[in-house]
Amino acid sequence: MNLITQNLITQVVSKNINQTVKSLWILRNVLFGKSMVLHTNSRRSMMDLHGRKHDYLRISLTERCNLRCQYCMPAEGVKLSAKSQLLSRAELTRLLRLFAALGVTKVRLTGGEPTVRSDLVDIVHEISSIQGIHTVAMTSNGVALTRRLPALQRAGLTALNISLDSLRSDRYELMSRRQGLQKVLACIDLALQLKYEPVKINTVLMKGFNDDEICDFVEFTRNKEVEVRFIEFMPFSGNKWDDSRMVSGDDALGVIREKYRALQPLLASACGTATLWRVEGYRGRVGFISSMSQPFCSSCNRLRLTADGNLKVCLFGGTEVSLRDAMRAGDTDARLAELVLASLRRKRPQHAAERRGGDALRRPSQPVAARGYCTLTHLDDEGRARMVDVGEKPVSKRSAQAECFLVVSAPLLRMLRSARVPKGDALTVAQIAGVLAAKRTAELIPLCHQLPLELAQVTVHLPDSNEGPARIRVLCEVRVTARTGVEMEALTGCAVAALALYDMCKSVDKHMVITDIRVLGKAGGRSGDWSLPIEKIV
């Protein structure tokens, strides 16, 4: 109570309108006891000892991600949990029903990257059907989301946050270590067409990297009904936290005000994390999540559930409670509820960084740093390249097939068919080159394992017609009994065979094109068998 009153006075004096509204809301709940009544329908109080009602649950569906963003990827990597340590879908559903009964009304799905889950649509459908859950939201990087948006909307997904730190392709690739900006922008456009409400863009600002794009993101809101939210760089261990890298919300706002004189403040929701603004005449709006420079602990209404079933009542807290272990030990729902409420009662009034006057920014707890982020398997603890240790994998029969095409002119095709290429038997040379390359893949591709191949077979197929331009198909099949697969051997074999064929024929046709190299299928290994659908093989 004293904390809330003190925060309120401070915010009024500093004219922080949005934070004042939030504190007034919390103070109202405490004074009138609105949120502390134990309902007879078994929905129990989720109020902590500091007057904060918790009705928002963030769930990490997976630790895996399809990007490798530099600011959340520790240089030393983070070892992923074994699948058996993660919550099963049945366990997740049970916990969600429990939290709904306790008073949670909003659920946000996060990761890692939630779209790497093949059962994501089913999970959303199950959550949206739980009584008491009114909002099902998701935070995604958007790279693999576009084609799933309609199905997710039908399943019950109502709100969407897209993580996007740059509108420039080169910077996006530098930050995420992957290409994909155009896919993300297409995802945002489709989400707007489908009337997702709201569509928010999460942008982590870093000085010297993307702080010169602040106004570009404001312009992004001119004709799009999106909310771009600038987020202060947060102190996860291992990402080389440095005060000089942070762009505060006030600094970002100052940059915007210099260019946009018609910037207008908007009223935030009672438990919202962002202070909101809109440029007059623009369809969208911008916000600032200043969790470092202006913590919003006094209005925090969030709980977090990690992919391995740990409950976190504060993002920066060093303690977690394993609901997974409790379930697997046979605890009843009543006992699980007691664990949740007991954790909530231990929630501090402020997060660690605020309590310790900034020291926690340099020494955050390792669980905070590691939670929800992937490791790069080809980097060691110091960020240097390494070969993956496959010693613990079982030996099994493995195979792979790959293909590519060489597009040639009609005259060259006729010369190949009649073995009249000036340099000699081009088809045989290509086959031999492909086999040799497959056998020496480990010498050509960094960090590949040396494998004792049992079969490396390259075939070159000429089209039936002599008309040009013609596509010559180069196929490579590889087999081995080993601890790792041979997809790279198959790809290397067909690629080098095509290169050798190109070299043998370049005096005749200087416009040849090598194209469409791909894996057709693989067998064996932990991920099982896979093959390209027959309709996609031309």
Image (cartoon, rainbow, N blue to C red):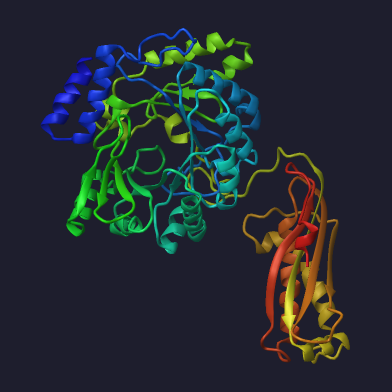
Residue 194 image position (x, y, % from top left): 51, 50
In depth, the one of 390 and 414 nearer the eye is 414
Residue 475, compared with residue 157, is above or below; it is below
Count of numbered tags:
0
Quick one: which residue is furthest to the left in this view? 13
- Residue at 44 percent across and 58 percent down: it is 172
Position of residue 414 in the picture relative to residue 18 (left or right)? right
In depth, the one of 524 and 46 nearer the eye is 46
- Residue at 51 percent across and 54 percent down: it is 190
Position of residue 158 in the picture relative to residue 535 (left or right)? left
Residue 321 image position (x, y, % from top left): 49, 19
- Residue at 55 percent across and 34 percent down: it is 61
Residue 470 image position (x, y, % from top left): 77, 82
Quarter in which the C terminus is drawn: bottom right
Position of residue 530 in the picture relative to residue 293 (left or right)? right
Residue 469 in view in this figure:
yes
Residue 265, compared with residue 342, is above or below; it is below
Residue 220, compared with residue 467, is above or below; it is above
In the picture, residue 52 is in which quadrant?
top left
- Residue at 31 percent across and 33 percent down: it is 269
Quarter in which the N terminus is drawn: top left
Residue 344 image position (x, y, % from top left): 40, 16
Residue 356 in view in this figure:
no
Position of residue 201 in the picture relative to residue 245 (left or right)? right
